[in-house]
Image: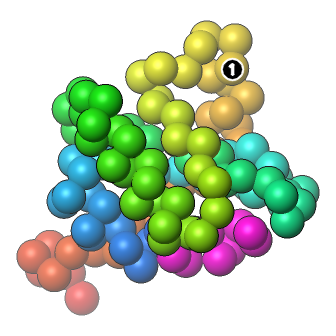
Amino acid sequence: MHRDSVLRVLSAHWKQIAEDYGVRRLAVFGSVARGDATSGSDVDILVEFLHPPGFDRYMQLKFYLEALLRCRVDLVMDSALKPWARETVLQEAIYVPELETVSSGHH
């Protein structure tokens, strides 16, 4: 899946993702972010939750994202990044543009 398509889908569903799953931020990294994904590539997504999600909520979000994107998702929690991987992941990460919620009052 192409980077722009992934970001567009995630951005369009941002409000629901944030509210239903307690997500603070999402970012795409790995082959999709670099632009060298193939048709068989999964989508690597970095997630930062507002509060520790627990296994069930984590898996529900993973399955929701896979249904949205119609492909396999490797969901990685920001808090679980290994020190040796953190720098590379954060350098590659493209954060999902958060569509402002209606309640923000900015138009």
Q: Is residue 83 left or right of residue 39?
A: left
Name the main secondary structure of what is drawn in magenta.
Answer: helix
- Residue 31: x and y in percent read 80, 50
Q: Is residue 54 above or below residue 84?
A: below
Choose between 97 and 85: the one closer to the eye: 85
Q: Residue at x 59, y 14 (%)?
A: 82
Image height of 80 relative to 61, above or below: above
Q: Is residue 72 left or right of residue 16?
A: right
- In reply to whether residue 101 is colored magenta, the answer given is no
Name the side, left or right, on which 56 lies relative to 72.
Answer: left
33 vs 98: above or below: above
Q: Where does the image place residue 75, in percent across and percent down from the top left? A: 53, 41
Please say if 13 is above or below 83. Answer: below
Image quadrant assignment for residue 92: top right
| Residue 102 seen | yes
Q: Position of residue 58 (x, y in %)?
A: 35, 39
Mark 1: secondary structure: helix
Q: Amino acid at mark 1?
A: Ala
Q: Which residue is mark 1?
A: 85
Q: Residue at x 10, y 76 (%)?
A: 103
Asked whether 59 or 24 is in front, the reply is: 59
Start-end of magenta stretch: 1-9
Q: Residue at x 37, y 73 (%)?
A: 13
Work out which quarter of the rendered image holds the C terminus and state it: bottom left
Q: Position of residue 17 (x, y in %)?
A: 31, 61
